[in-house]
Image (cartoon, rainbow, N blue to C red):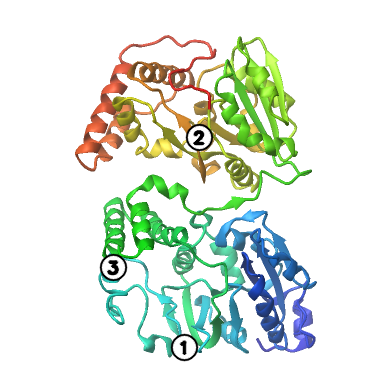
Amino acid sequence: MTRSRAHAREAGIRGPSAEGGFADSGKVDVAVLIVTYNSARVVGTLIADLRQETRTLSFRVIVVDNDSVDGTAEVVAAHHDVVLVRSGGNIGYAGGINAGRRHLGRCSAVLVLNPDLRVRPGAVAAMLAALRDSAVGAVVPRIVDEKGRTRPSLRREPSLPAAFADALFVGRLPRGLPQHSETLYDSAAYDHPHAVDWATGAAVLIRADVDAEVGAWAEDFFLYSEETDYMRRIRESGRRVWFEPSAVVQHTGGGSGTSPALEALMTVNRIRYIERYHGRVYAAAFRAVAALSDVLRARDPVHRATLGVVFDRRRWGELPRARHSTCGTPGSRSGAVIVPAHNEARGIGGTLAPLSVAAATGAIELIVVCNGCTDDTATVARGFAGVTVLETPVASKTFALNIGDDAAELWPRLYLDADIGITPEAVADVFAELRSGRILAARPASRYDTDGADAVVRSFYRTRQRIPQFRKALWGAGAYGLSEAGHRRIGAFPSLIADDLWVDRRFAAEEKTVVDTTPTIVTTPRDLGSLLSTLRRVYRGKAQVADAASAAGTLRTVIGSIRGPRSATDAAVYVAISLMARGRRHHVRPAVWERDDSGRSSR
């Protein structure tokens, strides 16, 4: 970017540095954002390359370290003019980018780089020159390997025909089927500048105003497909993604590595991407083609493992995802967990045990409110280090929640049923979402534990977990959280049965979320009688909240979930049991403890 130094000073832009230093304030030409994970061996070399580029451009360099254990943060910290951001966990590539975006300062462009790159002289300047075109929102360079050979980094928008061509031919023919593949293999495509749909996210320069307009990268992808999503949003903003072959970076292959789980995640995230932007039928066909690709390569154990994950959607929750190292660090507590408990001596230990270490180290505030207990719940709870135990003779869940709120000091807060299995990572992820300021209420993902349940109960819950509204609402997971602002919205908990449903109705869709984290474990009733009792209690709770959910709408959704004979049988069971539970009208009872004990056991 050519300008006189006087002009640069007037604009508040830091001039190039002959000493190879990076700016810590003022406006710069380029803010560089690097996300590291166990990258100690390579990140220093990349920083050195960037220092060479400061002869002609001004830089601010931000490195976000995702809880590396190989000394990466220490390597970066030795560079006193580099901004080091410790993310507090492995929060993924998109999460790291978003964490770094808060430290960009004033700049003309944002350069996102993998740590295992070498930047050839003049590469950043060439990308910046291409970015001067107002129609261009982002620029990607030519990527070469260690021998200087161009790597196929350019991509077409993911589609069913491209996925089918790749499934049949890529890796099975010498060059695949170039004219139909998602990847651009034709060497001519890398010889001249042109617009592309997207490119691998190892290196991309984004205009600062486009970065601000397009906003955060999609963290729910963790790794892979986040750049596909981001560059699609750039195109939807009316700008181009531009390939500039004169800008060259070298990929050394010494980054964070890969694994069978990451290979499976790559495939699953491609399916998730298609599901986000296409209809149900198209997405189902794409998923089938993805499975076909692994079937044709099933001799490879990695492809066999990926195939199993693609077929079983329940296993998607086991794939790598954003992880915070703890619920917080000692001396820096991250929030309060309030557990109302009524005669839970047999099972509360299973809920408290995973959280007690964080509570004992001061990472969270953990409060158990024993209400109307006639067993040893309080004694069991006091046996866990770090737990504050309160007691009241009033057997009411919402009364207990209010007592817990009065005693708690920290925000945000998670309200957790005493018979729910939850991990410290899930608590941390919910707290992080609530602290972000983007939403007011959140709950972790959840799954049903039907082990030991009879066939009818299992059939009922197979249908239930396919109903979208049950997966998106705050209720039904045995846990939900509120930020301080969210709690101000609801005030004290009223005397009712369905507190989670009542809270859910206080927030608009954009104010609440289900956090994609380690799922809570919700133990289902074990037999039909217990299930009917549970459902009747649910319907009484809905009556108290004046829930206007349409039974006809739910029926349409259940019918729409049918995919074959088994799901049709499950749907019929679901409808029949629901009608049985609704068959008698029940007067609304006060919010005393009612529950199913059929699935409770010592855990």
The quarter of the rendered structure image containing the N terminus is: bottom right
Q: Look at the picture and state if 183 lies above or below 597.
A: below
Tell me the SS state at disc 2: loop
On residue 149, the disc is 1
As drawn, is 148 to the left or to the right of 338?
Answer: left
Residue farthest toward the left in the current orientation of the protein: 565
Q: Residue at x 71, y 19 (%)?
A: 390
Pick the front one: 181 or 596: 596
Real-space Cα separation, disc 3 to disc 1, in angstroms:
25 Å
The quarter of the picture where residue 119 lies is: bottom right
Q: Earlier in the sequence, mark 3 or mark 2?
A: 3
Q: Where does residue 572 sit, x and y in percent of width and height? A: 23, 29
On residue 62, the disc is none
Q: Residue at x 59, y 56 (%)?
A: 91
> Mark 3 touching mark 1, by CB under 8 A?
no
Residue kind at label 2, given as amino acid type: Leu
Q: Which residue is mark 3?
A: 167
Q: Where does residue 106 sit, x and y in percent of width and height? A: 71, 70
Real-space Cα separation, disc 3 to disc 2, in angstroms:
39 Å
Residue kind at label 3, given as amino acid type: Ala
Q: Residue at x 67, y 89 (%)?
A: 2
Q: Which residue is mark 2?
A: 474
Tell me the SS state at disc 3: helix
Q: Look at the picture and state if 71 lies above or below 372.
A: below
